[in-house]
Image (cartoon, rainbow, N blue to C red):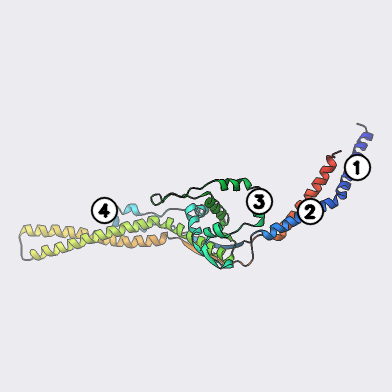
Amino acid sequence: MSEENKSHIVQDDEIDLVELAKTIWSGRKFIAKVTGVFIILGLVIAFTSPVEYEASCKLLPESTEGSMPNLGGLGGLAGLAGIDIGGMAGGGGTLSPQLYPEIVNSLPFILDVMNDTIYFESIDLRTTSFDYFENIAKPSLFGYVLKYTIGLPGVLKSALTIEKLPEDQSNTQEFYRLSKKEWKIIEKFKDRIALSIEEETGLIAIKVEMPDPYAAAQVAKKIEQEVTKAVIQYKTNKAKDNLQFVTESFKDAKAEFESQQLRMARVTDRNMNVSSATAQIELRRIENEYNVAFEVYKGLASQVEQAKIKLKEETPVFTIFEPLRIPEDKSSPNRIMIVILCCLIGVFTGITVSMAKYLFPTH
């Protein structure tokens, strides 16, 4: 290809770019109108979107892994009564902090939080989160537009569908039966909750977003309490079972010891002035049974105290690293950012349409 042809192609390209720029410039009024429409749309979205407030706190869990102290000969002593104390040694279950978000997102946990009565300060009403989002909260103007445009098929389908009332669940309480509307409310409520674990420090960060600042703080506090309760319950289940088992065994051993004590006293009183070999043998036999019952009783009494110590060791401790406070500033919507974003979209749309008119002329 000759240098003259190359120069001609480059010149044509430069002319095309110049013409394209002229086309965009000549359509500046159109671009301005499109941008203006998008700015108005952004203002509508910004000022009709519901205001949200975010409450947060941070917890520092303390590891409480411990081991059962050495029981010495207590296991053997209790074994005389047919009790296996050795199998009770060992720590509680291990719950990874990475599972905490799964606990928060579980249906029983969410329902417990949503059915807790809280105070909505902005409307001076005390009700549950579930009732608020089902019967009180209203979607924004933009939400109405989306609902009756893009979501119109779903609205018509819901209107034509007759939902059956839940049957009596008195005998099936292990199951959950919720309507589609209730499931949607629950899923949207889950999006308002965020629980994260900082890998380096191990801090548990809880964030809750609600339309009311006081309600946001209350829900965050409820989640903080329920998370710590769930973790403590999981970690101490085994230790509690051990304590209950040992306590019941101790009561049985105490009753047996007192029975043997009373029996030996009666035999001793009866044979006090009797020197026959038969009486002496009977007395020694009863004394041996008494000594065995006493050793088991004493060993289990010590084991009860050990089980109480173990329960305390197994109970995790949570330190409030960053306490909750009632938020004063809204977390959303970011009105300035919405307007700026819509402005940029308007400029981009106007320029794109102008370029399309130049690249794909209709005549």
What element does badge 3 sit on? helix
Residue 197 seen in the figure: no
What element does badge 4 sit on? helix
Residue 167 seen in the figure: yes
Q: Position of residue 248 (x, y in %)?
A: 29, 58
Which residue, given by chain and number where applicable, does mark 3 sit on? 146
Q: Tell me how far mark 1 sits from mark 4, CA to CA.
A: 101 Å
Tell me the residue at 85%/42% (across/down). 358
Tell me the residue at 80%/49% (across/down). 350
Which mark is in front, 3 or 4?
3
Answer with mark 1 or mark 4, whichever residue precedes in sequence.
Answer: 1
What element does badge 1 sit on? helix
Callout 3 touching callout 2 (CB < 8 Å) = no
Q: Residues within 10 Å of mark 3 (few under 14, many from 20)?
A: few
Which residue, given by chain and number where applicable, does mark 4 sit on? 79
Which residue, given by chain and number where applicable, does mark 2 sit on? 35
Residue that sits furthest to the right in the current view:
4
